[in-house]
Amino acid sequence: MADRLRLGVNIDHVATLRNARGGALPDPVRAAVMAEQAGADGITAHLREDRRHIRDADIGAIMGAITIPLNFEMAATPEMQAIALSHRPHAACIVPERREERTTEGGLEVAANATWMGDYIAPLRDAGCRVSLFIAADPAQIDAAARIGAPVIELHTGAYCDFHAEGDFAARDAELARLIDGAKQAADLGLEVHMGHGLSYDTVAPIAALPEVRELNIGHFLIGEAVFVGLPQAIATMRAAMDKARG
Ligand SMILES: CC(=O)[C@@H](O)[C@H](O)COP(=O)(O)O
Ligand SMILES: NCC(=O)COP(=O)(O)O
């Protein structure tokens, strides 16, 4: 279906569990294959500069094992650009990284680095990767993303999810309003709109209901759920919640 909201399953934290003991299990590749079999529309994997979870060998192994697209998440560094160009994944999502962060804390600063960022993404786009920029729902960042020729943006839903978890529903709803406005602005600029970070069964519906949104990338929550109900069931439940919200 043309307007089907796609679900990208981020398998980073299968690798977190694997790396906890320094061995080979659980295998992120098995998780990617299982996610595809369970109906995931894509796999997302974030090769961080510090390799805290996904490792270099995982990327080629995952790409060789799945038939759905790989969304390769990467910092805007020469090292990651070279790795992306060597693998040529379906998609390359540029995300901000700080070694000391526990997880992705904010969005890319595109507006202040537009020229440099435009030069950085050009080889990826020319190599046929669908370039996405992971940004906050900030009008200036959205405008800059369109200006430098990124075809896709992924809006950071972390603050929206954090406020929900904290019970600060006024702040949550204000952040949701920013995401709604950002999705509209981006779509009006011709950008494909994705969203992700921190989404769960409890927070996905208002995001999935947004007609401008074409893809959700969800990982940490699904991998956590998989510990209890298995990955196929976790994905099926999230898929059902997304479809129900979409109507
Ligand atoms: C950009 C984003 O929100 C995630 O895709 C990212 O992978 C989060 O980083 P960790 O997976 O290391 O928590
Ligand atoms: N880009 C968001 C993503 O891939 C998954 O984020 P999370 O669900 O692991 O927080």
Image (spheres, helix red, strand yellow):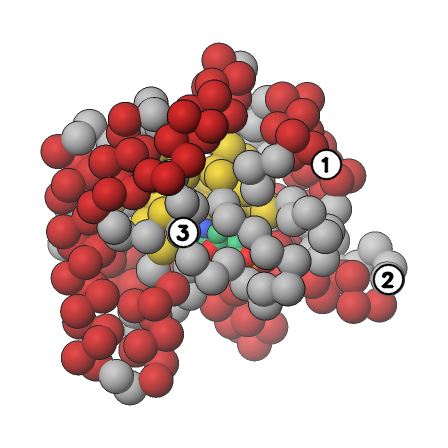
Q: Which residue is identified by label 3?
A: 107
**Element assignment for label 1:** helix
Q: Which residue is identified by label 1?
A: 61
Q: Which quarter of the rendered picture does the C terminus lie within?
A: bottom left
Instruction: Quadrant for residue 209, please give it.
Output: bottom left
Farthest residue, direction top: 126
> Closer to the N terminus: mark 2 or mark 1?
2
Which label sits in the foreground, 2 or 1? 2
Query: Who's the residue at 17% across and 30% down the image?
Result: 189
Determine whether 194 is above or below 175 in the image.
above
Task: Judge left or right: residue 10 versus residue 114.
Answer: right
Instruction: Quadrant for residue 244, please give it.
Output: bottom left
Which mark is drawn over residue 22? 2
> Closer to the N terminus: mark 1 or mark 3?
1
Task: Judge left or right: residue 131 versus residue 136.
Answer: right
**Relative to the observer, which residue lies in front, 226 or 178?**
178
